[in-house]
Amino acid sequence: MAKIISMVNQKGGVGKTTSSINLSACLAAAEKRTLLIDLDPQGNASAGVGLEKNQFTHKNIYHALIGQVPLKDAIYNTELPNFDICPSDNNLVGAEIELVGAMAREQKLKMAFATIQHLYDFIIIDCPPSLGLLTINSLNASDSFIVPLQTEYFAMEGLAQLLSTVRLINGSLNPNLYMEGILLTLFDPRIKLHKQVSGEMRSHFGDKVFKTIIPRNTKLSECPSFGKPIILYDIESKGSEAYLNLARELIIQIKNRETTPVVENLEEEIKHAGKIEEIAREHSLQ
């Protein structure tokens, strides 16, 4: 059965969609059958892998969530072997409203996965930049989640709120939900501030921060406009190297956890997040 991982952060512009696309592509390159779910109404992940909007107007994640089509009918191939996508468009904005009065509204995505989960090794979900019903559906359906975090102090604000939301889901809907890790993104080693943020995150969260850091990279910025993941656009770029390393790190991490289970302590992580936010606020006042 597929490992289902949400890429989640209520802040926009932190590299969430870029990471969803390129982690998925690198997992596929490692011969892992991978499905990317575009759960963001902006549909940037769909465009970022080369899908044209007229290809999926009547069959996408919106139609699967409201029960119009089975999820398997809303899945499309990309040009990379082992890499499929379930796209979205702005109709998904209405899904949160339409699902408000629905029975088991938090379970819709999980129920949709039941028929296709055995077809994949990984399902990566690109969540919208909010903590609404779509994100709750995603976290409820997931085994774990990754938090992309830009290496700027303002990006650290809201982390405690995110983890508190996860704790609520953990307590009422999905008791096995696990934090896979915090992924530092848009990192420039020449900027002192980025090094400070990276140091603070590792100091407070330890091994919950991925060893791999995603650099600020021109090729990573360019490749979505060509509808290609970075490994098809420029495999020799630093961005490509970083996401290949992230995929490798994730595969090893999951394999190790299967042999040596780790006990999650979200209360401790929320405390760390609170301290991080205090540091961010102090820095903004300087």
Image (cartoon, rainbow, N blue to C red):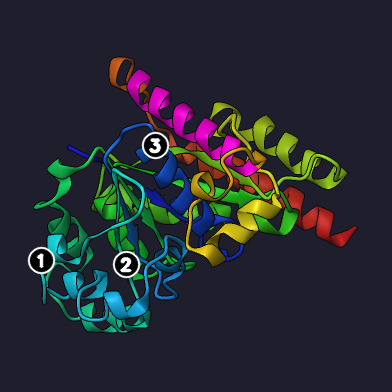
Residue 124 position within the rendered picture, expressed as x and y whole percent measured from the top left: 35, 49
In magenta stretch: residue 105: no
What residue do we see at 30% from left, 35% from top? 32
Of badges 1 and 3, nearer the viewer stands 3
Of badges 2 and 3, nearer the viewer stands 3
In magenta stretch: residue 243: yes
Q: Amino acid at mark 3?
A: Ala
Between discs 2 and 3, the one toward the N terminus = 3
What residue do we see at 13% from left, 50% from top? 116
Q: Which mark identifies residue 70?
A: 1
Q: Residues within 10 Å of mark 1 (few under 14, many from 20)?
A: some
Q: Which mark identifies residue 245?
A: none
Residue 83 position within the rendered picture, expressed as x and y whole percent measured from the top left: 32, 48
Between discs 1 and 2, the one toward the N terminus = 1
Please state if 109 lies on the left or on the right of 47 as rendered: left
What residue do we see at 22% from left, 64% from top? 106
Point out the image quarter for the C terminus: bottom right
What residue do we see at 18% from left, 65% from top? 108
Q: Marks 2 and 3, how far apart in space?
A: 20 Å
Q: Which mark identifies residue 29?
A: 3
Q: Which residue is mark 2?
A: 87
Secondary element at image label 1: loop
**Span colored in magenta:** 239-256
